[in-house]
Amino acid sequence: MFVLPDLPYADTALEPVISAKTLSFHHGKHHKAYVDTTNKLLADAGETPGSLEDVVLAAVGDSSKKKLFNNAAQAWNHGFFWVSMSGEKSSPSGELAAAIDAAFGGLDKLKDAFVTEGVNHFASGWVWLVHESGTLKVISTHDADDTLPKAGVTPLLVCDLWEHAYYLDHQNNRKGFLEAWFDGLANWSLAADQLKAAQGQGDLWHYPKPK
Ligand code: MN3
């Protein structure tokens, strides 16, 4: 059984960008439902996979496993989203800062690219900072789609573009949410660790193993 991982901070830690009410519903209702449905589908199929990453990769592109893919990928995406945020404001340093400068021309330009990608993304999905082919890129994915099936792509950070992520706090102002998220919540420590892992130093973030 896959677990709903505890949030790595208090419900109030991300205020005012994300209120405790939004965070508790998003984690305790939305994410929990994806985990519960994934567990039920796997139990019904008699499967006991070793990792959530394996479930996503085995289901992607298989039309008979679309529901499993959607729920497992959403469970994974939310796990990565929680750790992509921190209540303690930080900024990129060292190799990560150098990589941002090289790819975008500075943190402000990365912010522009990230916010623009998220604003222009139609309907639900995710906006990502990723490492690919020796450089950093901003991409977005639709619905439950994530970076796991994309060979050579390592996610450094993700922000949820589904309305449930921001509507209570920002209504339809996705741009305002993304700007405040980037400035106040982005976890540059995670991004630095993921970049190192992409370059062969240390481990990538993984969803907690099933219990
Ligand atoms: Mn969500």
Image (cartoon, grey):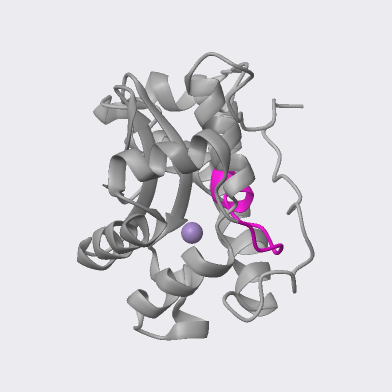
Instruction: Give whichever of 145, 153 is nearer the camera.
Output: 153
Give yes or no for residue 101 being in the magenta stretch.
no
Residue at position x 58%, y 48% in the image: 188
Residue 5 is situated, as x and y percent measured from the top left of the image, at 72, 44
Residue at position x 68%, y 69% in the image: 24
Residue at position x 27%, y 57% in the image: 113
Residue 72 is situated, as x and y percent measured from the top left of the image, at 49, 37
Residue at position x 56%, y 43% in the image: 80
Residue 104 is situated, as x and y percent measured from the top left of the image, at 29, 47
Toward which corner of the image does residue 135 lie, by quadrant?
top left
The answer to whether residue 104 is visible is: yes
The answer to whether residue 145 is visible is: no
Instruction: Give whichever of 122, 135 is nearer the camera.
Output: 135
The C terminus is located in which quarter?
top right
The N terminus is located in which quarter?
top right
- Total numbered badges shown on the rendered structure: 0
Instruction: Give whichever of 183, 80 is nearer the camera.
Output: 183
> Does residue 90 appear to the left or right of 41 in the view shown?
right
> Does residue 178 appear to the left or right of 86 in the view shown?
left
Seen in the picture, residue 172 relative to 208 is either above or below; the reply is: below
Seen in the picture, residue 211 relative to 164 is either above or below; the reply is: above
Residue 71 is situated, as x and y percent measured from the top left of the image, at 46, 42
> Does residue 204 appear to the left or right of 127 in the view shown?
right
Magenta segment, which residues? 79-90
Give yes or no for residue 80 being in the magenta stretch.
yes
